[in-house]
């Protein structure tokens, strides 16, 4: 049977216990497209560029108004990072609420929030659907998301999340992975569970 605790206090408690009690800056940032603005290397790089421009302007005897404006820009990335960090303090509450709304447990979401995880392991209560049937729906989310395999009992399928880490901007791909997991759950697995009840989904 599907999970009957959906929307109940038990579902909320289950969701609350399934993620870290306290989110780090990285975990908060992964939940938002704006989280990349809090990434320390990016903040340091942007501040450094503005500092070089500021020093260059001083060397060319720029006017006081130009100097003040460029000087303020040096601290702008830090200020933006602080504002975004404060705005994302409620990220854990939003993640728990999302988990509680799902008709089945979604486990190990901590991995996604920490920039890890390559696949979703979906365990069905009965027999799993055919991979070809599921791939049609997965392709509607993204061509790089597809069934990669299963296990001998025919109740478990692995679904590739399909987000490749960026060496230049890993903070952005962290959010892309989180957003992709949510899309796969909401657009594919939740409707699928009405025909093939799901026992649990686990990030691996």
Image (cartoon, rainbow, N blue to C red):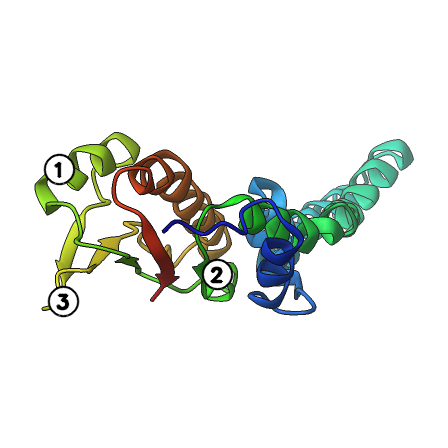
Q: Nearer the viewer, mark 2 or mark 1?
A: 1
Q: Is residue 163 above or below residue 63?
A: below
Sequence order check, earlier mark of 2 and 1: 2
Foreground residue, 77 or 113?
Answer: 113
Taking the image as shown, residue 116 lies to the left or right of residue 59, namely left
Query: Is residue 50 visible to the viewer in this orientation of the structure?
Result: yes
Asked if the residues shown at circle 3 and circle 2 are in contact, with their CB atoms under 8 angstroms apart, the answer is no
Numbered disc 1: secondary structure: helix
Tell which circle, 3 or 2, labels the residue nearer the N-terminal end.
Answer: 2
The front one of 3 and 121 is: 3
Q: Residues within 10 Å of mark 1 (few under 14, many from 20)?
A: few
Residue marked by disc 1: 133
What residue is shown at x 30% (from left), y 34% (from top)?
141
Q: Residue at x 67, y 51 (%)?
A: 91
Q: Secondary structure at mark 3?
A: loop
Q: Are marks 1 and 3 in contact (CB under 8 Å)?
A: no
Quadrant position of the C terminus in the picture: bottom left
Disc 3 designates what residue?
151
* Residue lying at the far front of the rendered structure: 1
Q: Between tags 3 and 2, which lies in front?
A: 3
Mark 3–mark 2 Cα distance, whole angstroms, equals 22 Å
Marking on residue 109: 2
Instruction: Find residue 84 and name its label.
Output: none
Measuring from the top left, give residue 42's x and y in whole percent.
58, 54
């Amino acid at each position: 049977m599907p999970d009957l605790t959906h929307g109940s206090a038990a579902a909320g408690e289950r969701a609350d216990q399934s993620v870290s009690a306290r989110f780090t800056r990285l975990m908060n940032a992964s939940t938002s497209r704006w989280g990349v603005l809090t990434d320390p290397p990016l903040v340091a790089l942007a501040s450094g560029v503005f500092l070089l421009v500021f020093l260059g302007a001083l060397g060319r005897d720029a006017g006081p108004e130009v100097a003040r404006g460029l000087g303020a820009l040096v601290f702008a990335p830090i200020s933006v990072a602080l504002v975004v960090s404060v705005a994302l303090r409620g990220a854990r509450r939003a993640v728990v609420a999302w988990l509680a709304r799902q008709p089945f447990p979604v486990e190990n979401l901590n991995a996604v929030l920490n920039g890890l995880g390559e696949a979703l392991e979906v365990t069905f209560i009965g027999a799993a659907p055919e991979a070809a049937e599921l791939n049609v729906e997965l392709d509607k989310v993204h061509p790089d998301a597809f069934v990669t395999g299963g296990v001998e009992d025919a109740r478990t399928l692995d679904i590739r999340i399909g987000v490749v880490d960026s060496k230049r901007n890993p903070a952005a791909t962290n959010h892309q992975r989180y957003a992709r997991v949510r899309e796969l759950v909401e657009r594919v697995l939740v409707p699928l569970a009405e025909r093939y009840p799901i026992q649990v989904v686990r990030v691996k």
